[in-house]
Amino acid sequence: MPVPLLDLRAQHARIREKVVAAMMKVVDDQTFILGKQVEDFEREIAALSHTKHAIGCANGSDALLLSLRALDIGAGHEVITTPFTFFATAGMTHNSGAKPVFADIDADTFSLNPDAAAAVVTSRTRAVIPVDLFGQMSPIERYRVAMPSVPVIEDAAQSIGARRSVDGEWTMAGEMAAIGTFSFFPSKNLGGYGDGGMIVTQDDHLAKRLRRLRTHGAIKTYVHEEVGFNSRLDTLQAAVLSAKLSFLSEWSAARRRHAAYYDEAFRDVTDIRTPAIDEANESIYNQYTIRTDRRDALQAHLKAKEIGTAIYYPIPLHLQECFAYLGYKPGAFPESERASKEVLSLPVYPEFAQSRQDEVIEAVRSFFGR
Ligand SMILES: Cc1ncc(COP(=O)(O)O)c(C=O)c1O
């Protein structure tokens, strides 16, 4: 039987009754746009993220674009980010009118390296966007030291509920940055039944501006203080996500168990590097990503056995054709380029049965002659 990379149907089967009831309430009430469920869900995410405000929006990409606009970032400005991330992080920077400026990642954790980021700050720098990749937080507190005057937009699209110990206290993804952004794309640990996004902040003024920007800059109906966007979180999605939220910590804990099981099973396989989780972090393992020099052959071997895998991300963003205008050449960011050649994500979804995981482990080990 094939082993999928992710099995959303297995998850839905378990929660179907609760989710369908929540959706039908919206359908029966006919409150599709900014209904009560959006407000409720915003409160729930603010509580989870230890932030004063949470503002729903249409998707995680818009969450970034709205955040850049709320910080008045646009033409003539520069935004520093990582080339080893999903396209949206740099794509939305471009769409804001600002210039994406890349800096390399940390060799082990895949996080943007704060010192490398600080080295490319100029008088035009207006923000830095570290990405909480694959489920573990970036070292947000280090930006305060490395580049204290530059606001941090934390792209936590893949890391809702992830936490990091700072000075002995747990801090949540989105909590320490000027603005944190989440995606509810279906494959995320908290995935909607369609697109969705959220922005969190501790700042009252930014929160007010973000609410305005997501509804065409309107302060009330037909009164526009500025030009914004149509980027609201759909009430149906908010209802689904609220219903799913009570399972999130259980699901993320299951992912951590599967990750630990892989780590143990691959301990003696010297051709593999298992994911490096910064010791201050508790990852939610949106992905379990190994590294190996023989990545493409391993992926082909697993495909032949009908085991789902994925490469996040095969082309670092500074080498994407659309960013040729930025002038980066191959070799500019060696750690990101190396990661793109070596990474392979394996199934780690919560409902993954141990017997199926044993099949994946056996297939990987046999590829390396173990
Ligand atoms: C790191 C990162 N940033 C931004 C996004 C964009 O989110 P969305 O797909 O909801 O627009 C994603 C998700 O796909 C992501 O993984």
Image (cartoon, rainbow, N blue to C red):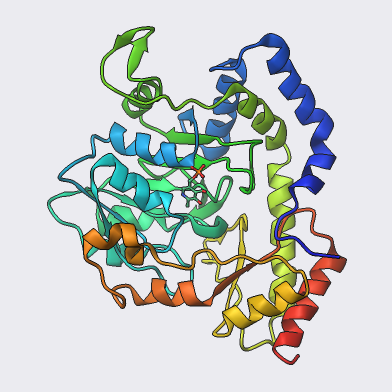
Outermost residue, left side: 123
Q: Position of residue 38 (x, y in %)?
A: 57, 22
**Is residue 168 visible to the viewer in this orientation of the structure?**
no
**Is residue 40 visible to the viewer in this orientation of the structure?**
yes
Q: Residue at x 22, y 40 (%)?
A: 74
**Vertical relation: 292 (above or below) 56:** below
**Total marks in image:** 0
In the figure, is residue 239 to the left or right of 295? Answer: right
Quarter of the N terminus within the rendering: bottom right
Q: Position of residue 202 (x, y in %)?
A: 40, 33
Rendered image quadrant of residue 343: bottom right
Viewer-side residue, 210 vs 236:
236
Outermost residue, bottom side: 369
In the figure, is residue 245 to the left or right of 155? Answer: right
Quarter of the C terminus within the rendering: bottom right
Q: Residue at x 76, y 30 (%)?
A: 19
Q: Position of residue 146 (x, y in %)?
A: 27, 59
Q: Position of residue 162 (x, y in %)?
A: 57, 50
Q: Residue at x 30, y 65 (%)?
A: 103
Viewer-side residue, 55 vs 2:
2
**Vertical relation: 324 (above or below) 56:** below
In the figure, is residue 65 to the left or right of 132? Answer: left
Rendered image quadrant of residue 302: bottom right
Q: Residue at x 74, y 69 (%)?
A: 307
**Vertical relation: 308 (above or below) 180:** below
